[in-house]
Image (tube, helix red, strand yellow):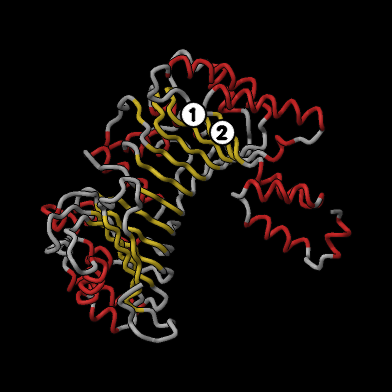
Amino acid sequence: MTASSNRNCGLPQELCEDILDSLWDDQEALLACSLACRVWIPTTRAHLFRFVRLHDERDCIRLQELLRLSASAATNVAGYFSELSIKFGGKSHDARSVEERMAHWIPQLLPTLQSITSLEISCADWGYDFLTEDARTCLMTFSSIITTLRLSYVTFPTTDDLTGLIHAYPRLSKLQLVHCRADPPVFEPLTLARLPSDHGMTTTQITELRASSFADMLVGLLSSPSRVSLRRLHWETPVLNAGDTLVRQILLEDCESSLEYLKLYFFHPQELIDLDLSKYPQLTTLHLCPHRMFSARKSVLCSPIPDFLSRITSVRMREIVLSVQGTFGSDTGYLEFLDWGKLDCVLASLRRRLPALVVSIQLEFSLERTADDPFSRVVGQVTERLPVALSAGLPVQVTYRDGRRSHDSANAPAYTRVAWLAFDSFPSGKHLLSA
């Protein structure tokens, strides 16, 4: 199929590309489309060769062969690569030998991947000898257009080593730290914000951060020449001491004028008490996740939520999500983790000020199975607890997920149901009590 025949079929090229984009994860369909029409080849190749995985030596050998074939055919598939995932030894019994082999391949392969914009490094020890200096240098210099960096289960000798890696990518805007760790940094918590800038690094503008590592991993980033000005923050980091509290405080202060999305896992009620939402005028989405625990402490943990929400002043606020997990032996008391009457009044007030606001309550419990549908019980009881907000027309979505899997099969998916309690644009105009 040629370009002229593509035009004769009646579909504009832009529409064809949109259709091909919708098939981004269907390898067979993309391969068929690439053979059907020459004009579609750039779009299909962009999806077929978008992701590169180097998780063992076999992946490295396959990539080397692909690059060799591409060079001989002058197809330049490397130009389509945009996402790279590198996994080192991890916890396997031969982790050291795996990391040694990966360190051998990295300087050979990565210089050919200059179109990579997203890099993921997992299960690595940045300080061990078998991750050679050549390999580390190559990881930090092979692409100058990286905008996204994901680090998971990576150990650094110090937080300065992490900071150096981050600042090696001048266009970096999205950073994810999952279970990364380093030796405790030597710093005085009360002077963290005033540490001198002596790194000599280029400025990096981080606009999106997911942190689920210890807070000390962010010390070097916050005290370096560039300040973090976030639009999106996913905070899953426990606040264990005064130093952690200060790191969190500085991070949130730096993004008061820019933050639009906040997903906050909190481990102590004081974390909500200390955070004033009135300082975030650009906030559009707030997702609260109290740390998973048994019912005995959940009421204490969640008690500040109504007052916390009452401090919202952003006229841009569109969505509030509350995700709660718990384990209960009976079906009584599982919703008594906060003052629903107070929450009802706060949500009704927000509804009057923010007519576009939508609230989502996501519950994951392990309840006793009875003859009636647990989903109906949950929906009914949440409805009873929010009469003022619902009568004000606030759209409230309830998601219930049974934390226990089916007894029939250990691999069966967990029971999950969704319902809208109020949704003014729904054709019937009624409050819904079922999905």
Residue 165, labelled with which disc? Answer: none
Q: In which quarter of the image is residue 116?
A: top right
Q: Residue at x 66, y 32 (%)?
A: 113
| Vertical arrangement, residue 336 with respect to residue 187, above or below | below
Spatial separation of the CA atoms under disc 2 and disc 1: 8 Å
| Vertical arrangement, residue 39 with respect to residue 153, above or below | below
Q: Is residue 186 left or right of residue 334?
A: right
Quadrant containing the N terminus in the rendered view:
bottom right
Q: Residue at x 71, y 38 (%)?
A: 79
Label 2 element class: strand
* Residue 325 image point, x, y percent: 24, 54
Q: Name the residue under label 2.
A: 53
Amino acid marked by disc 2: Arg
| Vertical arrangement, residue 18 with respect to residue 218, above or below | below
Labels 2 & 1 near each other (Cβ < 8 A): yes
Residue 87, labelled with which disc? Answer: 1
Amino acid marked by disc 1: Lys
Q: Which residue is drawn at 35% across and 30% down?
A: 181
Q: In this view, does 126 lie to the left or right of 57?
A: left
Q: Which residue is drawn at 32% across and 38% down?
A: 215
Q: How crowded is mark 1: few (under 14 residues within 10 Å), some or many (20 or more)?
A: many
* Residue 135 image point, x, y percent: 55, 20
Q: Is residue 49 left or right of residue 76?
A: left
Q: Residues within 10 Å of mark 2 (few under 14, many from 20)?
A: some
**Of label 2 and label 1, which has the lower sequence position?**
2
Quadrant containing the C terminus in the rendered view:
bottom left
Q: Is residue 278 visible?
A: no
